[in-house]
Amino acid sequence: MGNASSMLTQYDIEEVQEHCNYLFSQQEIVSLYERFCQLDRSAKGFISEDEFLSIPEFSLNPLSKRLLRMVDGLNFKDFVAFLSTFSAKASLRQKIELIFKVYDIDGKGKVTFKDLLEVLQDQTGSFMSDEQREQVVTKVLEEAGYAKDYSFSVEDFIQIIDHPGLKMEVEVPID
């Protein structure tokens, strides 16, 4: 699996399947490998930032810079593990943990008021002023019972987002 141009063996497929907690079938892993090889244009065995940005859905995402932090330089095994979060079989907790990583800008395991503002900035661009963004985030936090100076842990995120009726149906098509 080190060389992107090599073929996957049955052992490789099973190893990747185990690495992603069996969220993809063996055929899906083969399809993902074919896509990985297409993206890994220089056959280095990992996908660079530029190669990820060649995916239109990825490059158009307002949070692509934050996602790049998580995916730049992934080998095939880690590429599949990252994508497994978008599988229909992934748990809500796995999806929330990924969202938390997107919001946790400095990677310290906490999401602050400033982090929330920066993500909202990425999502709204020039459509909202800094003052409007601050008002929105402050209001949302107040309505949820939190102060501006509160730092959210991943468990806080899970508690806030994991409630009946919330659907997180973001999936990556495999074929």
Image (spheres, helix red, strand yellow):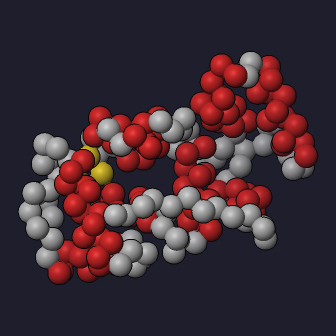
Spot occupied by residue 46 in the image (x, y as percentages of width and height)? 22, 50
Say whether residue 166 is left or right of residue 70.
right
Residue at screen point 66% across, 44% down: 111
Q: Residue at x 78, y 43 (%)?
A: 150
Q: Quadrant of the C terminus?
A: bottom left
Q: Quadrant of residue 75?
A: bottom left
Task: Name the spot of residue 32 as percent of width and height, x first.
Answer: 29, 63
The relative height of residue 102 versus residue 92 in the rendered view (above or below) is above
Residue 134 placement, left or right of 121: right
77, above or below 125, in the image = below
**Left or right for 151, reference 174:** right
Viewer-side residue, 26 vs 136: 26
> In front: 142, or 13?
13
Q: How many marks?
A: 0
Residue 128: x percent and y percent?
Answer: 73, 22
The residue most toward the front is 175
Q: Which quadrant of the figure has residue 129?
A: top right
User: Who's the residue at 88% across and 37% down the image?
Assistant: 139
Name the spot of residue 147 as percent of width and height, x first.
Answer: 86, 41
Asked where in the image residue 2 lies, by quadrant, the reply is bottom left
Q: Quadrant of the N terminus?
A: bottom left
Residue at 27% over, 66% down: 31
Residue 62 shown left or right of residue 52 in the figure: right
Q: Is residue 37 visible?
A: yes
Q: Is residue 24 above or below residue 135?
A: below
- Asked whether residue 147 is in view, the answer is no
Closer to the camera in the image, 104 or 56: 56
Where 88 falls versus 116 (above or below)? below
